[in-house]
Amino acid sequence: MTVHWTPRIWKRPYLATPPDVEALERAWGVKFPEDYKQVAMRYQGMTPSPDVIDIGAGNTVVSELLTLSESEDEDLRIYSMSDTYELIKDHVPQGIYPFAGTGAGDFICFDYRSNPDAPKVVFYFTEEAGEQAIHLVANSFTEFLSKLHD
């Protein structure tokens, strides 16, 4: 199934730049998957369609790709990957980095703990603590996109 993207944070697409990506990779000490970078640089702040992802026996909606670039609008900074990470970093294991929001305060994240070159995609449930809060979604970003449904 093809994923389509619609504006959510901004009224029209707001492209991220390679320096935006490199700055965040440097700050976190990670290398984002190429498939993710191609999508995120073009569609940051947008909502996928389809937008539902299964999490164990339930599911959630992927509300938006968090932004790689920082918004000058203070109200929109809550959608940035770096600001979101600052909010959750004391509650998630080291190596977990958010890249999408659910609209319910939970996040879809990259999990670099087992393989720093090929992160898995996990769901971080903010109402739980520690390892119980982390749920495997997909083994790669491409697999994550392929699992989105209506």
Image: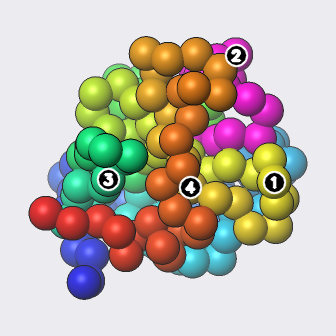
Residue density around tag 3, few if under 14, some if 14–19, many if 20 or more, within 10 Å: some
Q: In the shown orientation, is residue 42 left or right of residue 97?
A: left
Question: SS for tag 4?
Answer: strand
Mark-to-mark CA distance, 1 and 2: 19 Å
Q: Position of residue 3 (x, y in %)?
A: 27, 75
Pointer 4 or 2: first along the chain: 2
* Residue drawn at (57%, 26%) of the image: 132
Q: Nearer the viewer, mark 2 or mark 3?
A: 3
- Disc 1 residue type? Ser
- Which label is found at residue 121? 4
Which span is picked out in magenta?
A: 87-98
Find disc 3 in the rendering and name its residue. Answer: 54
Mark-to-mark CA distance, 4 and 1: 12 Å
- Disc 3 residue type? Asp
Find disc 1 in the rendering and name its residue. Answer: 114
Which of the image's four quarters has the N terminus?
bottom left
Is 40 one of the magenta-colored residues?
Answer: no
Residue density around tag 1, few if under 14, some if 14–19, many if 20 or more, within 10 Å: few
